[in-house]
Amino acid sequence: MSTDEPAVPRTRAEMRAAREAAARSAEAAAAAPWSLSEGGGEAAEPRSLSEDGGADRDETRQVPQNFEPEAPSTGVPVDEERFVSPAARSTTGEGPAAHSTTGEGPAARSTTDRKAPTPPRDRRFLVALGAVLGILVLVGAGLGVVSLTQGPRITEVQVNPEQAIETSGSRVILTTNQSLAAIDDSQVTVEPAVPFTLDAAGRGVGIRFTVPLDDDTEYTVRVADATGAGGGPSATLSTSFTTPASKIFLLNRDADGDDKIFRTDLTGEKAEPVFAADKINDFRATSTQLVVSVEEDEGSKLLVMKRDGSDQRELKLPGDGYVGAIQVSDRGGYVGYSYSDRELSDTEGRASVLVTQSLSGDDDPVVTEVGGEEANIFVWQFVPDSSAVLFIDFDGALSLIDRSSDAGVQSLGLATTIQGISRGTYTAIVERLDGTVVELNLTDGSEQPLAASNPDYGTATTITPYPGGTLRHVVARDANGIPSGQAIITVDDEGTATPLVEVGPTDSILQACASPSGQYAAVVIAPDLTDNPYDQMLLPLPENMETHLIDLRTGDELVALTGFDASWCQTAPQF
């Protein structure tokens, strides 16, 4: 019998309590095999690996260097880093519960509390990302080397071929991949040849055509020896574009029905009406719109519409009256016309005043004044590619006024008529009071006689300039001065004359004008005048008229169409 315990009889309850206490002690020992003994003695031996139930057999166990095997004399566990039993570090979390830091044993550390090592796939991602970035760097460097070794290249081209055949001043704009060194006009070529101006800065090269281009033609623009602003090799910048085939508008009056404006190609096989009215007096076309003068009993109406006849709107007139001699300034966005009040007397009303207004209809019509008074105009024309107007009043004074400036009226002497104004040159052909025909520079007022043609076909009744020459209407007369025939003569810039169209004494040439580029001519002929009565319109014309389309480069006639007033013409037929 042990001397540690007195031989005191125990009741059943005491024995049961002792057994339960022993069981609890066993459980505590199993949960914390390294907990200190109650008396501050040595720690209990750790459980074997087989008893840890699921711990990693290869896991290295190490007691931290600062672990103290014995607690302080107070018997309270030290709050330092403690070793955690393999069972408490089970990855399944099914081992014995870990003690709280306030409990009797050190807290167990789960493997989920430790920082997980970087998975191998994360390292693979970083390696792949680095490889991609390296490739991009190499590609960028390669492109830079290519750019430096090949010179500038075109990255964008801007051009409007349809507008280019309608008006002068259209552009081709080249954008390059780098800023360019200064470019001279001599480096630029256009094929087929056409006059141009150059505007180059930075990465942009702008080529502005000073005259309209031919239709159905491939143009090639080249800039030779272009170099980057920072130096390097040179390169030739080149681009090509093709212009569309031309279409024109013609007016066909019908004594028994509505008058119609037709749009057609140059074969006449695809003609289609775009506008019809009882009495169409005159019309003009811009690159985007039609302006039509309609005659009614109470006066004229001036309509603006799209080229297909849609979106019609009426422009405000200076009063109730009549409109004639319509012209348009495509570049300035203006329409001009001769206006007369319906009610006229010796003391009241306006007659043949020149009116200009915006095609948009946003402004009021403006009556042209000279010396502070409304001027009666005999003949007038818009200066192509501008908003300026050249006119002769009833006193024979030739004047110029520009709607886009405040310069006022500029006097240019006396004249009897204005034959025409060249596109892109700002040069007018006018006839002076003494009968001489001169080329008048509208920028500085200088002038020189118009050279005679070779051969000389005599004095022309009308002269219509076009890029590269003029169309001249001449009349042949017999010994008694009676007309024996008429002809349209082409005269190039060197003065060489070539007959284009000829008619006999029974026919009459009413109008001749060229396409914007000077590629074609439209000649209006009234056949058999003795049996071709005039209509009763404000602008009276023979009822039967034909428009002959001719290739000015070859002299060949393309087609003859019914109608007149081709949209290539700046003014209506004059008598």
Image: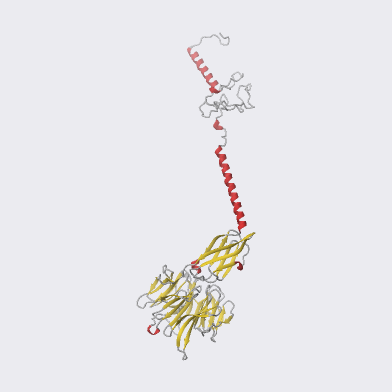
Whether residue 373 is visible, yes or no, is no
Relative depth, front residue between 194 and 282: 194
Color style of the picture:
secondary structure
Please state the horizontal and vertical placement of residue 406, each as a whole percent of the image: 56, 74
Is the N terminus in the top left, top right, bottom left or bottom right quadrant?
top right
Q: Quadrant of residue 104?
A: top right
Relative depth, front residue between 330 and 24: 330
Please state the horizontal and vertical placement of residue 300, each as a whole percent of the image: 41, 76
Please name the residue shown 60% across and 52% down the image.
Answer: 142
Relative depth, front residue between 17 and 442: 442
Work out which residue is located at the far left of the displayed protein and give it: 256
In this rendering, is residue 477 above or below 423? Answer: below
All told, the count of numbered labels is 0
Is the C terminus in the top left, top right, bottom left or bottom right quadrant?
bottom left
Please name the residue shown 51% across and 18% down the image.
Answer: 23
Whether residue 512 is visible, yes or no, is yes
Please state the horizontal and vertical placement of residue 384, each as a whole percent of the image: 52, 74
Relative depth, front residue between 138 and 34: 138
Work out which residue is located at the far bottom of the displayed protein and give it: 480
Please state the horizontal and vertical placement of residue 340, each as a whole percent of the image: 45, 80
Q: Quadrant of residue 116?
A: top right
Asked whether, in this view, residue 288 is left or right of residue 127, the answer is left
